[in-house]
Image (cartoon, rainbow, N blue to C red):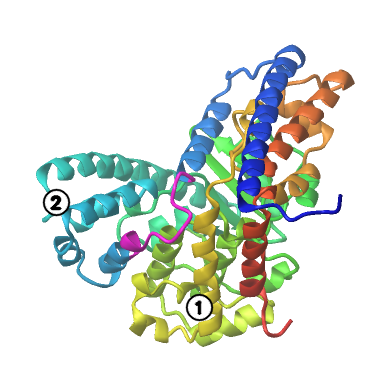
Amino acid sequence: MGWQKRSPKQKKSGCGILSIFRGLIQILCLIFSFAVLSYSLKPAIRQKTEIEAIEIILITKTSAMNYEYGIPAPLLRFLGACVFGDAGSYYAGLGEAERAGLEKQGKSFGMTTWFYRYLYEVLPKEKLAEYQKIYQARQIKAMMGGQELKRLYQVLASHDLRFVPIKGADLACRLYPDAALRPYGDWDIWFHPDDCDRALAVLAEDGWTVPDLYSNDHEEVRKTARHHFSPHVRGTYMLEPHFSLSNFDGVDLYEMWEHTVEYPDGDGQRVLSPEMNLLMLARHASSQSYYHAQIPKLLADAAMVMQKENVDFTALRELANSWHMPYPGNLLAAFPEFFGTEAIESFGADPAKSDGFRKLFELRGTLGEPESISLVLSRYEVKGMAAGGILKHIRAHNTSRMRRMYHLPEHGAWGRVAWAYVCWFWTRSLGASQWILRKPRLRNYAKSVEYVECTNDK
């Protein structure tokens, strides 16, 4: 009999059987992995302060991923009103159901401190008390972290190191009106290309250590990592020393450094120029094909850069073009709920590209969070690895790292190392199957990413 086209009913039945079969396979793999690991691998023993710090920070990162993957328009309108307008009037004009939805989105993105700061006079008493506790806890944490950051900057400067704090910690302490408004986990500091080796030595002298989970061979890490060395911890703080910036692959490091400027009000650090800062934020958002970019945080960061510093959008476009990168204004202009049409006109964005970004994030909302059972192998791994991420991580998982991850002997025990590789790859393959089986939507998403990333001068 020749091939016959299936009816919709048959297709639906087939999909149901496939889902059941896939579920059974995953359950069997889960049981198998637990059995193998319990027999072959030594249990992780939490006996060091630095391991505790890693666990706390990575749990924070994982929980921060519990947000909407679409476009949270109500939250964007509220944040835009906080930055550019009157948040109290905006909130007062909402109905009860709309307020509940807005507050739910705020909690999902970890931005409830904005409600307390900007709605202090209009919030109901019970809500005010709830958000006040969160705000005060965040404020205390920010103050303690800020003091330790200041101390670290002074240590680095005393050794004549050239360094630039970047991303969350820098933005919160330097540009936000209140550091409690900008949550962040680890710290990121970018060092001058000629100062990286000395910086690592100074950090070690200052008490910063590389946890057993990560490689202490900095040359090895430089070859396999894309932009930073292994995380360093000191007490409850984690630092990622950068030798480059995220998704600036192929750009000369010395040429990048020319876009840093002195910061007279600081403690010896340099800072990114306003244009470089916006470009860095946009490139960081493009990680993992924009899949884990938090839109509210990205837009709030960009708005603070624009408000506190004089951004030259013509220079920004020229800078992006010179390095064959998408113009950040196209990404920002995709969210008129936040910036408003008047501000967007000043970006000089390409309407077609901005519309492409808009459709990309709308499509992202239909995919959902990728499932993963990689937690079987390591409780320090962040869940949600996509299919494309598997090959990217294989190169970095050499035998030395596998031994550190699963507390195996430094030498020998090759059978247990082999089992670790089998289980590691198998569980991640199953996690990726959640994506592979959504092929049509993934293909459309990949095309959207390709379109917005394509520059006219390529």
Residue 115 location in percent, x, y?
A: 24, 53
Secondary structure of the residue carrying numbered label 1: helix
Q: In this view, does 18 lie above or below 417?
A: below
User: What span is colored magenta in the figure?
Assistant: 65-76
On screen, residue 111 versus residue 219, left or right, reads left
Residue 133 location in percent, x, y?
A: 23, 39
Q: Is residue 9 above or below residue 86?
A: above
Packing grade of label 2 (10 A; few <14, some 14-19, many >=20) is: some
- Which residue is disc 2 drawn over? 123
Packing grade of label 1 (10 A; few <14, some 14-19, many >=20) is: many
Q: Which amino acid does label 1 sit on?
A: Gly
On screen, residue 31 versus residue 274, left or right, reads right
Secondary structure of the residue carrying numbered label 2: loop
What secondary structure do most residues of the magenta stretch adopt? loop
Residue 42 location in percent, x, y?
A: 71, 15
Q: Is residue 412 above or below residue 15?
A: above
Which sits in the foreground, 36 or 150? 36
Determine the CA span between mark 2 and mark 1: 34 Å
- Residue 11 part of the magenta-drawn span: no
Residue 106 location in percent, x, y?
A: 32, 51
Q: Please give the label number shown on residue 329.
A: 1
Residue at x-position 57% and y-position 36%: 233
